[in-house]
Image (spheres, rainbow, N blue to C red):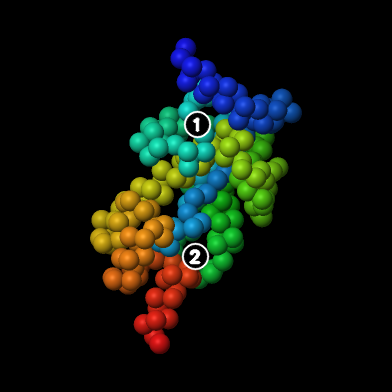
Amino acid sequence: MTLQEKKDGKRLAKISRMERELFVRGYRHVAGVDEVGRGPLAGPLVAAAAVFYEIPKLRRVRDSKLVPEEEREALYEEICGSAADFSIGTVEVEELNRIGNIHKSDLLAMKRAVDGLKITESLYVLIDGNFIVPGIPWDQEAIVDGDALSFCIAAASIIAKVTRDRIMRKYDEMFPGYSFSQNKGYGTNGHLEALEKLGPCPVHRCCFTPVREWFQRKLF
């Protein structure tokens, strides 16, 4: 075993400790829930829920923000193949604009992800962040930095990230000029320059400041 494999094994043991304790307490299934896409100027919010009845030996699983894109794609397939169940929940741009509150939209996306699960028996839900999700009928717990502390949450973060990245690559084909494949909708300098030159497209979030200010300049 290489030094890197030993390090990855120790990390897996550390981030799966919480789930193992829940299994010892008698829960048969543990779901991790995470979302991506709070900050971008364009594209949907995407949440994922991933359920496990044991921790698979996927040593490279960690917070999706720390995983290179190519590795995330490979891990996505391995995680989906190892999970007892998984589900995606989204809040599309039109609905996000209507709600006008990113926190409420965030909780809604996560609730939809959990609602989509088929496995619900003896389930404990671990939520990334500060807030539990209203309306979930199972025991749940919010964990700050959960994607660094829980295997299930880290797995869900990778599923959500890969799903959203794929959506943004499709949007890049539909709405060329904004480089969505590269910036994934985030407010990079290049994206802001394209927004100023081309104006918003249908997947831009009108409730976010740079997009809203563009409309205000055009109106006044």
Label disc, if present, on residue 61 of the rendered structure: 1
Mark 2 or 1: in front is 1
What is the x, y in percent for residue 124? 66, 38
Q: Answer with the quarter of the image where residue 101 lies.
A: bottom right
Which residue is at 30% across, 65% downward?
A: 194
Quadrant showing the C terminus: bottom left
Which residue is at 56% across, 56% downward?
A: 106
Which residue is at 58% across, 22% downward?
A: 10
| Observer-nearest of 4 and 166 | 4
In the rendered image of this protein, does residue 193 appear above or below residue 165? below
From the viewer's perspective, tell me whether residue 163 is left or right of residue 128.
Answer: left
For mark 1, does the 10 Å Cα neighbourhood hold few (<14), some (14 to 19), or many (20 or more) residues?
Answer: many
Q: CA distance from mark 2 to mark 1?
A: 30 Å
In the rendered image of this protein, does residue 46 appear above or below residue 16? below
Question: Going by the picture, which residue comes out furthest to the front?
Answer: 189
> From where the camera sits, is residue 104 visible?
yes
From the viewer's perspective, tell me whether residue 6 is left or right of residue 217.
Answer: right
In the rendered image of this protein, does residue 191 appear above or below residue 53? below
Give the residue type that dot 1 points to. Answer: Val
Residue receiving disc 2: 96
Give the residue type that dot 2 points to. Answer: Leu
Which residue is at 67% across, 31% downward?
A: 18
Q: Answer with the quarter of the image where residue 34 lies.
A: top right
Tally of marks: 2
Looking at the rendered structure, the secondary structure element under dot 2 is helix
